[in-house]
Amino acid sequence: MDINITIKPEAVALVSLDSSGQILAKTSDIFAQTYGLDADEILEGLEQREALGSTGFGRGVAIPHCRSNAVSRPTAAILKLDHPVDFKAADAIPVSLVFGLVSPENAGATHLHALAAISRLTRDEAMLGALLDAPDAEALFALLTNQFLRNAA
């Protein structure tokens, strides 16, 4: 990715969930456990954004996102689902990969750049395939980290 997004290995997980509500709750929990954010605040923000329209980006990817004063730069959590879940995406393809994003409250352009960077990453056919084929959270994190470093250079 070509912008500075915080992501820690602990924020990447392979999970078994059955609904978009469970996905948002798990994403909020990961933000709380990994970055010390308030899970209820993040869940509320993600749910409010989702109420405006699905963040199911398409191609089996969702990018639930919100803003918070508790972060100083865009911060990510990644979930790879063990089976696809309906996320009401525009293309009607169930979601297998979730990129949660929390950006600073006043980071309008920075937030949009982070969303665009995630979008570009998942539009790359080879990268999307590699992310979906990653056997564990460590491999998924390594793929993302290598991509971030490559595009930052």
Image: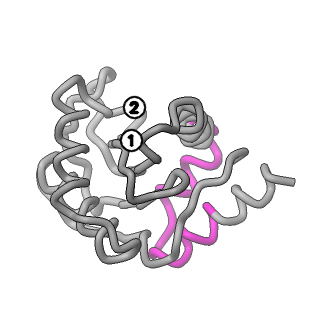
Q: Which residue is mark 2?
A: 57
Query: Based on the displayed image, in which of its 4 quarters is residue 28 positioned?
Result: bottom left
Do the CB atoms of the residues marked 2 and 1 lie less than 8 Å apart?
yes
Please tell me which residue lies in front, 16 or 47.
Answer: 47
For label 2, the crowd category at 10 Å Cα-Cα, with few meaning under 14, some 14 to 19 and many 20 or more, is many
Left or right of residue 111: residue 23: left
Left or right of residue 50: residue 62: right
Q: Position of residue 49 (x, y in %)?
A: 25, 33
**First-in-chain label (2 vs 1):** 2
Q: Which residue is mark 1?
A: 63
Q: Identify which residue is drawn at 70% across, 56% down.
A: 147
Vertical arrangement, residue 139 with respect to residue 38, above or below: below
Please tell me which residue lies in front, 143 or 50.
Answer: 50
What secondary structure is found at the residue carrying circle 1? loop
Q: Identify which residue is drawn at 62% across, 71% down.
A: 142
Q: CA distance from mark 2 to mark 1?
A: 6 Å
Please tell me which residue lies in front, 47 or 40.
Answer: 40
Query: Based on the displayed image, in which of its 4 quarters is residue 10 positioned?
Result: bottom left
Main SS, magenta region, reads helix
